């Protein structure tokens, strides 16, 4: 039994796009290495996606042309994974801002996923974001966007889609806005602490402002995190809706 002409070439392009997404997306397996479960996940997803909507390539290509097509598939997969990274950066910005203000930037830990040092508050917010996204099947949104991308931008075409600069710029603007809004309640508390510490330093010059200020900032920040915890649910809900909208706009940009 012989395979249809162009089947392996088309399946290889599907495999490249799927692999680029799985390697990039934090939930699906972004990390410092490419372990066996990622290989299995990429292969089985590619088989399912190609079985659902894949078609053999009609024309044979030389190695250079096929390499250009593979590069296109890598760019599309990385772009879809990048959208999830933008949503995750929103809570990371909030954690960095709060950690900087409360003095927790001095207590860092190494993130095993990214391999870089991450403040404790940032890790807390990121874990909450990921667990919440999984609980509402947000990873299914990402996989659904991957499946839709093969309809919007079929494999075997040299078309690189529309203008990606505008949606990426809008995503970054909304990401920064969401991060600031996410951290705003606790930051306002800490700003009030800064004003109080400044007044105390003027009234009682012999007071050790550095020691008292550090302790007061940590206490107030922890109290603020606990007091404003109920506000995290609507904030995360709005962020998840933004992520869904970013996926839709990204697919429109890919499809031209």
Image (tube, grey):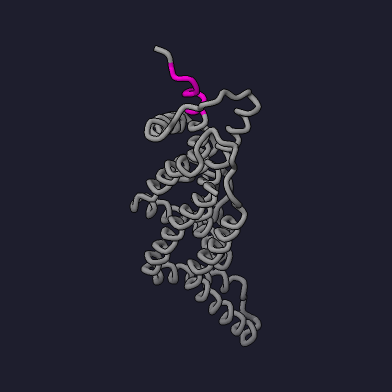
Q: Quadrant of residue 173?
A: bottom right
Q: Is residue 4 magenta?
A: yes
Residue 183, x across and y down, in percent: 50, 67
Q: Is residue 85 above or below residue 35?
A: below
Q: Nearer the viewer, residue 16 or 201?
A: 16
**Residue plotted at (53% across, 54% down):** 86
Tell me how many marks there are.
Answer: 0
**Residue plotted at (49% across, 49% down):** 251
Q: Is the N terminus in the top left, top right, bottom left or bottom right quadrant? A: top left
Q: Is residue 68 above or below residue 183?
A: above
Residue at the extreme bottom:
203
Side of 6 relative to 164 (left or right): left
Q: Is residue 248 magenta?
A: no
Q: Quadrant of residue 199?
A: bottom right
Side of 56 relative to 205 (left or right): left
Q: Is residue 17 above or below residue 139?
A: above
Q: Quadrant of residue 226?
A: bottom left
Q: Nearer the viewer, residue 112 or 20?
A: 20
Residue at the extreme top:
1
Q: Nearer the viewer, residue 137 or 211?
A: 137
Residue 118, x across and y down, in percent: 55, 52
Q: Looking at the image, can residue 23 be seen? A: yes
Main SS type for the magenta part? helix
Residue 56, x across and y down, in percent: 47, 27
Residue 107, x across and y down, in percent: 56, 56
Q: Looking at the image, can residue 125 be seen? A: no
Residue at the extreme front:
58
Q: Which residues are magenta?
A: 3-12
Q: Nearer the viewer, residue 8 or 116?
A: 8
């Amino acid at each position: 039994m012989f395979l249809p002409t162009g089947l392996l070439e088309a399946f290889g392009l599907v495999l490249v796009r799927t692999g680029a997404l799985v390697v990039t997306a934090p939930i699906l397996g972004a990390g410092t290495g490419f372990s066996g479960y990622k290989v299995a996940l990429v292969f089985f997803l590619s088989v399912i996606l190609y079985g659902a909507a894949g078609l053999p390539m009609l024309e044979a290509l030389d190695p250079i042309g096929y390499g250009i097509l593979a590069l296109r598939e890598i760019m599309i997969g990385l772009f879809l994974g990048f959208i999830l990274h933008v949503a995750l950066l929103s809570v990371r910005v909030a954690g960095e801002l709060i950690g900087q203000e409360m003095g927790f930037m001095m207590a860092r830990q190494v993130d095993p996923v990214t391999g870089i040092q991450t403040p404790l508050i940032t890790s807390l917010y990121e874990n909450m974001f990921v667990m919440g996204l999984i609980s509402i099947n947000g990873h299914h949104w990402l996989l659904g966007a991957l499946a839709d991308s093969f309809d919007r931008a079929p494999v075997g075409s040299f078309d690189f889609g529309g203008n990606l600069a505008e949606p990426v710029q809008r995503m970054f603007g909304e990401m920064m806005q969401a991060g600031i809004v996410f951290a705003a309640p606790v930051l306002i508390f800490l700003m009030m602490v800064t004003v109080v510490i400044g007044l105390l330093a003027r009234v009682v010059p012999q007071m050790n402002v550095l020691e008292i200020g550090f302790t007061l900032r940590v206490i107030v920040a922890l109290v603020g995190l606990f007091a404003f915890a109920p506000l995290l649910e609507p904030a995360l809900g709005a962020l998840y809706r933004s992520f869904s909208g970013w996926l839709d706009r990204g697919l429109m940009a890919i499809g031209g």
